[in-house]
């Protein structure tokens, strides 16, 4: 059995850790709650002085589950890890680009709202101002909801938005609008307003 045949979460559980989310675990060494962060390859306890850290390979070896890989197996592992890094870099780039698009859209909508509000303070019958508000306000919530998803939601939901599958995308955004935000990987609720400050009401 090789280290790469195990998921890191499985190895952490074998070592006595309690998995609490896709990225967090309780530490089996110091007893810290949610102090161990991990991804597919490495883990680390952030409790001061603990030192419980390592990788899939080192933990499997410590548990007596790893054996020495052949040269061909090492090449395969290196190739798979390189592909995973490329995929991660692609995802990060796509997320960053879409977030910038949404921030720009949000700023443009706020400019319309602020401009219309100023016009209405001078003349409450200004039809151009009311038309601007009618255009901007319905678009603010979807932009904010999508930003909340791309910033904080679990990876599968973020991927659905990036793939732009209309039906699934609309459902995720609808849920985020109804709830006023999203739950992150740790189960904490993050409000859409965290990413987009509120607008002035007319």
Image: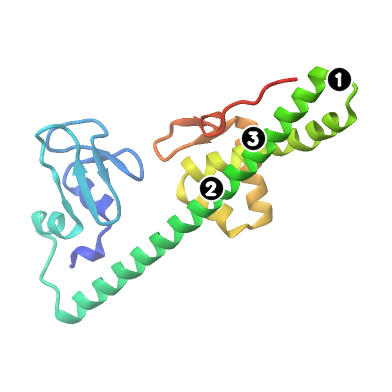
Farthest residue, direction front: 122
Relative to 37, 152 lies left or right = right
The quadrant holding residue 2 is bottom left
Q: Earlier in the sequence, mark 2 or mark 1?
A: 2
- Work out whether 48 lies above or below 21: above
The mark that comes first in sequence, 2 or 3, is 2
Q: What residue sits right under mark 1 in the picture? A: 123
| Circle 1: element type | loop
Residues marked 2 and 3 touching at CB (< 8 Å): no
Q: Judge whether 201 appears above or below 184 on screen.
A: above
Helix, strand or loop under label 2: helix
Q: Can you identify the residue that label 3 sits on?
A: 177
Residue 29 picture quarter? top left
Q: Position of residue 83 (x, y in %)?
A: 35, 70
Foreground mark, 2 or 1?
1
Question: Crowding near pointer 3: few (<14 within 10 Å), some, many (20+)?
Answer: many
Q: Decide: marks 2, 1 in contact (CB < 8 A)?
A: no
Give the side of residue 161 with respect to residue 70, left or right.
right
Q: Quadrant of the N terminus?
A: bottom left
Viewer-nearest of discs 3 and 1: 1
Total numbered badges shown on the rendered structure: 3
Q: Can you tell which of label 2 and label 3 is closer to the viewer?
A: 2
Tag 2 residue = 99
Asked whether 49 or 125 is in front, the reply is 125
Q: Which quarter shows the C terminus?
A: top right
x 80%, y 34%: residue? 132
Q: Position of residue 136 (x, y in %)?
A: 74, 36
The tag on residue 82 is none
């Amino acid at each position: 059995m090789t280290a790469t045949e195990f998921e890191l979460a499985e190895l952490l559980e074998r070592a006595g850790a309690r998995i609490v989310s896709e990225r967090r675990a309780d530490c089996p060494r110091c007893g810290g709650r949610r102090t161990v962060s991990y991804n597919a390859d490495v883990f680390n306890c952030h409790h001061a002085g603990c030192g419980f850290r390592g990788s899939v390979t080192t933990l499997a070896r410590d548990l007596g589950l790893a054996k020495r890989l052949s040269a061909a197996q090492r090449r395969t592992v290196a190739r798979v890890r390189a592909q995973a890094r490329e995929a991660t870099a692609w995802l990060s780039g796509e997320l960053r680009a879409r977030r910038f698009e949404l921030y720009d859209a949000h700023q443009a909508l706020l400019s319309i709202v602020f401009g219309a509000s100023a016009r209405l303070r001078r003349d409450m019958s200004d039809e151009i101002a009311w038309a601007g508000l009618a255009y901007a306000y319905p678009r603010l919530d979807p932009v904010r909801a999508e930003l909340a998803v791309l910033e904080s939601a679990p990876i599968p939901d973020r991927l659905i938005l990036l793939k732009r599958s209309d039906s699934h995308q609309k459902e995720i955004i609808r849920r985020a609008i109804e709830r006023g935000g999203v739950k992150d990987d740790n189960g904490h609720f993050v409000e859409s307003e965290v990413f987009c400050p509120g607008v002035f009401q007319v």
